[in-house]
Image (cartoon, rainbow, N blue to C red):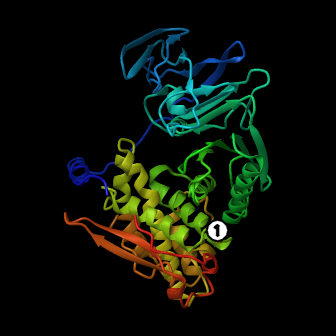
């Protein structure tokens, strides 16, 4: 658990804000104008010396555009028209005419060494080495202040003989996605491509490691996405950057928008990156609707991916219990776990934890409905059957889900939907929600907070598994998993 005083105090503050301010919908009269980044590599004697970035967008009615500077301070910043004020450390202010084109350019310092022996790649710096550059968008790019839904795109201009993942131009994302979008450019990259359905291309590129491992990563992502959504309602381009470290036992992954980043070491045992990455990609094929629909777009995408990975034997009992336990921890440890869906919509633009809660709540709700449907049909149906029946791109997934579950023999789940999704009542899964091979328990802490945990039963105690839980065939070894 995190520090007791911090969690309790944050919960009190968050609750008081909701009570005092009331719930009012967020309304934006117009969509913010898009921003485009041109990223260029400055070479010196053939090696990377700096990165130059030009950001282009249009000003609003007042002719003022404020930026949050990159996490790594640049050595030079200027505007091509208008005036620039950089007197405040956390703000660049451009003043120009209303609705005028704004071009801000900046140049980074020489990249820090890309040291495979250190686990600091998430540090907010632009990293480089002989013939390579890696950076997360937060370290490299200035972000315009305002709605995080502002469309954002980027183009990387490659020196001769250098390569990057996919095309040099990125698909349209949002400013919110920019923070964890990564840029990997090098003279020598292992590159592979997969087609998913008729309209989607997956590009995977790796620095270091073995080429056949990159092929396995691409195969796993592509095959699971086809299982999750046989119609492949996905964007035209998905990209994955892979950094292979020569030593260590850690791992890491990020996934945002249509891009993902994997950090892999030789000693990492069963890293959970496939779930996080594939869930993000799967959710891009779902009607979004912002925070209001995140319980479905992110949460039910999590259920669909975990179900597919289990069905294919890619998650054994221990790995699956570890995954659900992680979701229970994210939900149970959130100060917003009792906040209504409308309340999350109100608070999410200002509070990170409020943006994270709907995905965890939605996946737990999905497992609850899965158990409900299996019980109502004596194991003949599960939630995946209902989701195959409904249009997951509907802009109003609640009624569509209710109708699909009823059509599969699950009865009326409207009361459950109202309690746990709309009203935000505390969702506690019954002990046997995940079937006979698992147990869910509740831990009560001495300061009054309760949190659920998932456990995988040993094989000798895994009896009575119903035929609908096909994935429980996998995993000959199991042990309790604790968070």
172 lies above or below 85: below
Q: Position of residue 136 (x, y in %)?
A: 55, 34
> Image point 53% across, 26% down: which residue?
141
Does 22 sit left or right of 345 as displayed?
left
Q: Position of residue 470 (x, y in %)?
A: 64, 80
- Residue 295 is left or right of residue 473, and the answer is left
Would you place residue 151 above or below residue 259 in this image?
A: above
Residue 380 against residue 286 in the figure, above or below:
below
Tell me: residue 275, above or below residue 107. Answer: below
Label 1 sits on a secondary structure element that is helix
Q: Position of residue 125 (x, y in %)?
A: 50, 28
The picture quadrant where one finds residue 198 is bottom right
Residue at 50% x, 20% y: name it. Answer: 59
Q: Quadrant of the N terminus?
A: bottom left
Horizontally, residue 355 falls left or right of residue 271, namely left
Nearer to us in this view, 10 or 67? 10
Q: Quadrant of the C terminus?
A: bottom left
Question: Pointer 1: residues within 10 angstroms few (<14), some, or many (20+)?
Answer: many
Label total for image? 1
Tell me where residue 370 appears, x and y as whole percent.
Answer: 52, 77
Residue behind mark 1? 308
| Residue 128 in view of the camera | yes
């Amino acid at each position: 658990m995190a520090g007791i005083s911090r969690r309790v105090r944050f919960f009190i503050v968050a609750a008081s804000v909701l009570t005092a301010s009331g719930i009012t919908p967020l309304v934006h009269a117009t969509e913010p104008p898009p921003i485009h980044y041109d990223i260029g590599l400055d070479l010196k004697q053939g090696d990377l010396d700096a990165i130059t970035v030009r950001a282009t967008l249009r000003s609003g009615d007042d002719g003022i555009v404020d930026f949050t500077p990159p996490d790594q301070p640049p050595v030079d910043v200027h505007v091509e028209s208008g005036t620039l004020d950089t007197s405040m450390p956390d703000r660049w202010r451009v003043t120009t005419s209303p609705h005028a084109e704004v071009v801000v350019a900046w140049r980074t310092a020489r990249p820090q060494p890309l040291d495979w022996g250190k686990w600091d790649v998430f540090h907010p710096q632009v990293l480089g080495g002989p013939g390579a550059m890696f950076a997360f968008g937060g370290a490299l790019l200035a972000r315009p202040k305002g709605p995080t839904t502002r469309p954002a795109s980027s183009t990387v201009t490659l020196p001769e003989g250098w390569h990057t993942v996919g095309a040099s131009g990125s698909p349209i994302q949002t400013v919110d996605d920019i923070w964890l979008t990564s840029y990997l450019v090098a003279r020598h990259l292992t590159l592979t491509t997969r087609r998913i359905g008729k309209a989607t291309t997956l590009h995977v590129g790796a620095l270091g490691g073995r080429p056949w491992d990159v092929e396995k990563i691409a195969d796993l992502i592509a095959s699971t996405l086809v299982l999750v959504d046989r119609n492949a309602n996905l964007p035209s381009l998905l990209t994955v950057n892979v950094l292979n470290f020569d030593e260590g036992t850690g791992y890491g992954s990020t996934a945002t928008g249509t891009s993902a980043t994997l950090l892999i070491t030789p000693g990492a045992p069963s890293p959970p990156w496939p779930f996080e990455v594939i869930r993000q990609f799967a959710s891009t094929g779902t009607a979004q609707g912002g925070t209001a629909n995140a319980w479905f777009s992110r949460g039910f995408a999590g259920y669909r991916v975990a179900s597919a990975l289990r069905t294919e034997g890619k998650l054994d009992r221990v790995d699956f219990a570890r995954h659900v336990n992680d979701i229970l921890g994210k939900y149970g440890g959130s100060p917003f776990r009792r906040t209504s869906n409308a309340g999350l919509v109100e608070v999410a633009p200002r509070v990170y934890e409020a943006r994270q809660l709907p995905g965890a709540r939605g996946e737990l709700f999905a497992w609850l409905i899965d158990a409900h449907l299996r019980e109502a049909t004596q194991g003949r149906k599960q939630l995946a059957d209902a989701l195959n029946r409904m249009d997951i791109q509907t802009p109003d997934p609640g009624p569509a889900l209710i109708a699909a579950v009823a059509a599969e023999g699950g009865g009326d789940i409207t009361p459950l939907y109202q309690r746990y999704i709309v009203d935000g009542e505390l969702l506690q899964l019954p002990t046997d929600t995940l079937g006979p091979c698992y147990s869910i328990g509740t831990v009560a802490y001495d300061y009054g907070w309760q949190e659920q945990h998932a456990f995988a039963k040993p094989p000798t105690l895994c009896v009575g598994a119903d035929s609908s839980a096909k994935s429980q065939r996998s995993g000959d070894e199991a042990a309790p998993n604790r968070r």
